[in-house]
Image: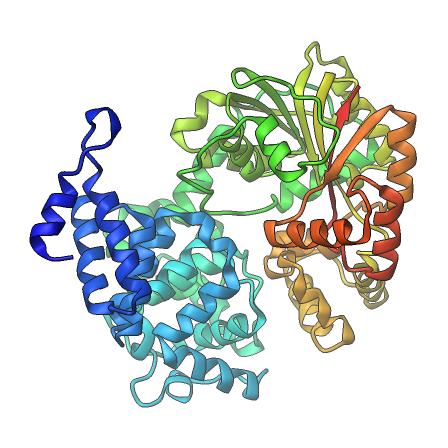
């Protein structure tokens, strides 16, 4: 397409006389050029799109791809980072992002190989990155974005970063090294300091902590180094720290580790209490989540196009016996066991017209949720503290109830399920998550090992348990994303109450309560795989006996949990 043709295309009119979106036209042209491997032309086209719409996430991502294909790794990294910032749901493709990081920053891949070969020895910056040391990677935008946005979910990268953290203790201080240290400090706060430490590091941190507590003059790099090993809000003189002027990246660390936790303490007082919490198991579970709110997150999906609940379930379960709710406004939704709010926020954005009551045992978790809720959603989510076991007294019913990952932390999960069903309107829909007896078998073995070792649930003991489990056949636990942060690892391996069920037990419960089974929820790729398999074999995907047989043959099918949708008659 020459310039004259391009100008004509941009002036093209749509039916009804509307002028075509110039950015959309250019974006389509850029994609076509990219598919023809005309990368230089595609680069120019994508840059024109971004002149019109700088916040175009797909254009940033695609521009990163074509720049990388041209060997322009540094420029590509900046656009990949920008795409992730604009569309945080892309972080769910974590393995792909790690592969992209190695592609735009080859020294990272080499450092990972060297670190794994030397582990548990900690390597210096020069040993990892050559004569340039840490400076070789310090300025990369994608690395910084990844570190400060989502917990590391890949063991090899975790071990390299663990070694990098130790190396930064003795690295020459430059602006780029301080900024990398800030990104790593924010990562360590997100994962709640789950990285292993050595005795040498522990001594160094204690000495630095004492110096800061004594009111010594702390340099930016010393403060950042300390923030890589412990949360700054735990220091005694935080007012003095936030009263000083710091470089912007350091100031961001202080916001994350001092100002935001302080905001959450204030917000606790504003959270209403719906019920008392008197049950012994409920109180023990509450205490766990007050100490370790679950999960700690930074970004929630943005730019989500809402759909009706009927459309969502019809797309997921096209052959299911669904009776449409027919509601696109005022969809009254209860999220029972909302934790730190990520799931409640996701549902509020996903379902058209959703208005959410999000309830949890833990005031600490709810305060995190309230602080982190996007402004545009504040009026659509109400957070409240309460015990599901006492919600039967709530003078309110709901169109949709979500209880994903909460019932199995009760003494009797089915009793809790019945209480929630009493709050569900006739024809209402319920999403339930329950632990599979077969799918959690290696978790059960790990919990037994931890009990034999006499390890408690303190952060230090969790770090020890992780490293010991990684030296055993139970290394398979790394398939759980929960293995990679302290609170989530406690939830996975140290929980005060965990119950398991089977598909046949679920089948019996649904029959007793006259509930229609709509289907198990999977990611899109696995859902399509099961659809194909069931259709090929002539089975219905709502046949729970068939699902039981499949899980018996493939015990890891529900290693996360059973995620199922049911409808009340």
**Residue 313 percent across, percent down from the top left:** 63, 33
Left or right of 348? Residue 52 is left
Q: Nearer the viewer, residue 179 or 150?
A: 150
* 473 is higher (above) or lower (below) than 561: below
Q: Image quarter for residue 80? A: bottom left
The residue at the point 47 percent across, 72 percent down is 161
Residue 231 appears anywhere in the view: no
**Residue 317 percent across, percent down from the top left:** 68, 37
Residue 405 appears anywhere in the view: yes
Left or right of 99? Residue 310 is right
* 466 is higher (above) or lower (below) than 335: below
Colour scheme of the rendered structure: rainbow
**Residue 541 percent across, percent down from the top left:** 77, 43
Q: Image quarter for residue 1? A: bottom left
The residue at the point 81 percent across, 48 percent down is 538
**Residue 426 percent across, percent down from the top left:** 75, 15
Single out the residue that lies furthest toward the top.
395
Left or right of 46? Residue 296 is right
Q: Total of numbered circles in the picture? A: 0
The residue at the point 86 percent across, 32 percent down is 414
Q: Nearer the viewer, residue 13 or 102?
A: 13
Left or right of 144? Residue 308 is right
The residue at the point 85 percent across, 42 percent down is 544
* 556 is higher (above) or lower (below) than 339: below
* Quarter containing the C terminus: top right
Q: Nearer the viewer, residue 124 or 237?
A: 124
Q: Nearer the viewer, residue 561 or 117?
A: 561
């Amino acid at each position: 397409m020459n310039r004259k043709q391009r100008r004509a295309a941009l002036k093209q009119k749509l039916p009804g006389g509307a002028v075509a979106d110039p950015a959309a036209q250019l974006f389509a042209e850029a994609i076509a050029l990219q598919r023809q491997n005309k990368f230089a032309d595609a680069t120019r086209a994508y840059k024109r799109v971004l002149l019109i719409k700088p916040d175009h996430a797909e254009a940033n991502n695609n521009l990163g791809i074509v720049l990388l294909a041209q060997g322009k790794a540094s420029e590509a990294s900046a656009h990949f980072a920008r795409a992730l910032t604009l569309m945080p749901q892309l972080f769910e493709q974590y393995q792909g992002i790690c592969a992209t990081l190695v592609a735009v920053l080859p020294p990272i891949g080499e450092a990972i190989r060297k670190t794994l070969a030397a582990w548990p020895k900690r390597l210096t910056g020069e040993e990892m990155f050559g004569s340039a040391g840490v400076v070789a990677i310090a300025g990369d935008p994608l690395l910084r974005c990844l570190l400060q946005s989502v917990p590391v979910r890949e063991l090899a990268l975790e071990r390299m970063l663990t070694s990098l953290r130790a190396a930064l203790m003795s690295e020459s201080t430059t602006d780029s090294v301080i900024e990398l240290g800030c990104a790593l400090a924010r990562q360590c706060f997100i994962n709640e300091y789950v990285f292993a430490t050595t005795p040498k590091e522990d001594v160094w941190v204690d000495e630095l902590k004492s110096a800061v507590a004594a009111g010594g003059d702390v340099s930016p790099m010393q403060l950042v180094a300390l923030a890589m090993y412990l949360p700054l809000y735990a220091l005694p003189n935080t007012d003095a720290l936030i009263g000083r002027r710091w470089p912007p990246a350091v100031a961001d660390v202080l916001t994350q580790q001092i100002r935001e936790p302080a905001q959450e303490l204030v917000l606790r007082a504003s959270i209403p209490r719906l019920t008392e919490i008197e049950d012994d198991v409920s109180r023990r579970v509450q205490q766990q989540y007050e100490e370790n709110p679950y999960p700690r997150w930074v970004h929630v999906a943005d730019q989500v196009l809402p759909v009706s609940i009927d459309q969502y379930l019809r797309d997921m379960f096209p052959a299911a016996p669904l009776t449409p709710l027919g509601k696109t406004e005022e969809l009254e939704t209860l999220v029972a066991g909302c934790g730190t709010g990520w799931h409640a926020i996701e549902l509020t954005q996903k379902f058209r017209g959703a208005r959410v009551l999000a309830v949890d045992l833990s005031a600490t978790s709810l305060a995190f949720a309230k602080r982190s809720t996007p402004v545009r959603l504040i009026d659509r989510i109400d957070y409240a503290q309460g015990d599901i076991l006492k919600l039967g007294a709530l003078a309110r019913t709901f169109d949709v109830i979500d209880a994903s990952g909460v019932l199995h932390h009760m003494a009797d999960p089915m009793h809790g399920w019945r209480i929630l069903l009493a709050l569900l309107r006739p024809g209402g829909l319920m999403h339930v998550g329950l632990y599979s007896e077969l799918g959690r078998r290696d978790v059960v073995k790990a919990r037994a090992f931890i009990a034999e070792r006499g390890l408690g649930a303190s952060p230090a003991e969790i770090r020890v348990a992780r490293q010991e489990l990684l030296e055993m056949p139970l290394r398979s636990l790394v398939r759980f994303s929960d293995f990679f942060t302290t609170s989530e690892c406690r939830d996975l391996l140290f929980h005060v109450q965990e119950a398991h069920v089977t598909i046949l037990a679920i089948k019996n419960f649904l029959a007793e309560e006259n509930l229609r089974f709509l289907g198990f929820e999977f990611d899109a790729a696995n859902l399509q795989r099961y659809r194909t398999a069931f259709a090929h074999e002539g089975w219905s995907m709502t046949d729970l006996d068939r699902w039981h047989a499949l899980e018996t043959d493939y015990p890891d099918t529900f290693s996360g949990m059973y995620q199922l949708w049911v409808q009340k008659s």
